[in-house]
Image (tube, rainbow, N blue to C red):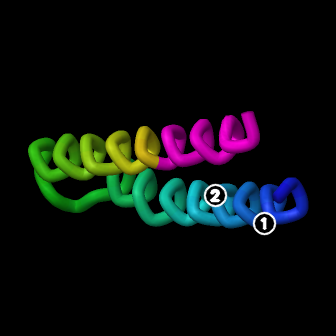
Amino acid sequence: MKNVKWLWYVCLAVVSLLVTFFGIGPVVFADGGMGERVLTLAVVIVIYIVIGVVFIRIKNQGR
């Protein structure tokens, strides 16, 4: 099972990078109003929390 964990870590790292690129970019460089930016930021934060929870569950899976 330990041999598969590195694959999960790589997948989570790639997903985190994609969320950062496609999530934070529109928050910083959005042409819309402040409400649109805040909503996008809230969605990005929720996605980061989900990624963190998945990471913790995978890390503690063998215990």
Task: Residue under label 1, please give it.
Answer: 7
Expressed as whole percent of the image width and height from the top left, the position of residue 27 reads 33, 50
Left or right: 51 with respect to 27?
right
User: Distance between the Cα atoms at labels 2 and 1?
Assistant: 9 Å
Q: In which quarter of the image is residue 46?
A: top left
**Does residue 13 appear to the left or right of 6 in the view shown?**
left
Q: Note whether 35 is above or below 18 in the view shown.
A: above
Quadrant (top left/top right/bottom left/bottom right) for the C terminus: top right
Report the residue marked by disc 2: 12
Q: Where is residue 11 in the image (x, y as percent from the top left)?
A: 67, 65
Residue 7 x/y as whole percent: 78, 66
Amino acid at pointer 1:
Leu
From this view, report whether residue 59 is shown above or below residue 7. above
The residue at the point 15 percent across, 58 percent down is 32
Which structural element holds mark 2? helix
- Which quadrant holds the N terminus? bottom right
Q: Which secondary structure dominates the residues rendered in magenta?
A: helix
Q: Nearer the viewer, residue 23 or 56?
A: 56
Relative depth, front residue between 63 and 26: 63
Residue type at the position of mark 2: Leu
Residue placed at 22% from the left, 61% from the top? 31
Write down the region rendered in magenta: 51-63
Where residue 17 sits in the image (x, y, percent)? 61, 59
- Which residue does the image show at 49% across and 39% down from the upper left? 53
Task: Name the disc covering residue 32, or none.
Answer: none
